[in-house]
């Protein structure tokens, strides 16, 4: 970032920002319920995958974590690795 951008960034970083979507109409509860159901279905499919043997259980758990990450939910600090 050059000096010009740094000065503007500093000047704007304490300003209040307001974002609106005047034409957006949705039911938040319905979106969360549908997303949860779809994610649970993915988890069920991952756990039911008999093509993986027990030695590959780690991969199943990693796939479950990735399903949560795909919907924007982090898995905490215990998933800071990749296989």
Image: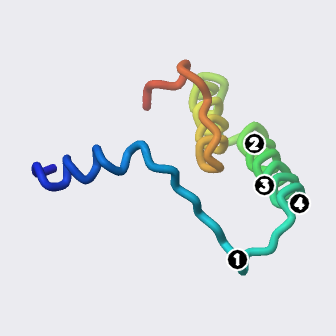
**Residue that label 4 marks:** 30
Question: Please, what secondary structure does the residue beneath circle 2 have?
Answer: helix
Please name which of the two marks, 2 or 1, marks the residue nearer to the observer.
1
Please name which of the two marks, 4 or 1, marks the residue nearer to the observer.
1
**Residue that label 1 marks:** 22
Q: Residues within 10 Å of mark 1 (few under 14, many from 20)?
A: few
**Residue 31 x, y percent position in the rendering:** 81, 60
**Residue 72 x, y percent position in the rendering:** 61, 46
For the point 60% across and 34% down, the residue is 74
Along the polypeptide, which appears first: circle 4 or circle 1?
1
Question: Please, what secondary structure does the residue beneath circle 4 have?
Answer: helix
Q: Nearer the viewer, residue 27 or 16?
A: 16
**Residue that label 2 marks:** 43
Q: Nearer the viewer, residue 21 or 40?
A: 21
For the point 53% across and 25% down, the residue is 79
Q: Quadrant of residue 76?
A: top right
């Amino acid at each position: 970032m050059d000096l010009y951008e740094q000065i503007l960034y500093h000047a704007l970083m304490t300003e209040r920002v307001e974002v609106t979507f005047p034409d957006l109409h949705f039911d938040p509860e319905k979106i969360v319920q549908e997303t949860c159901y779809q994610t649970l279905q993915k988890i069920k499919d991952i756990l039911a995958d008999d093509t993986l043997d027990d030695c590959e259980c780690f991969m199943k758990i990693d796939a479950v974590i990735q399903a949560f990450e795909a919907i924007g939910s982090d898995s905490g600090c215990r998933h800071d690795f990749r296989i």
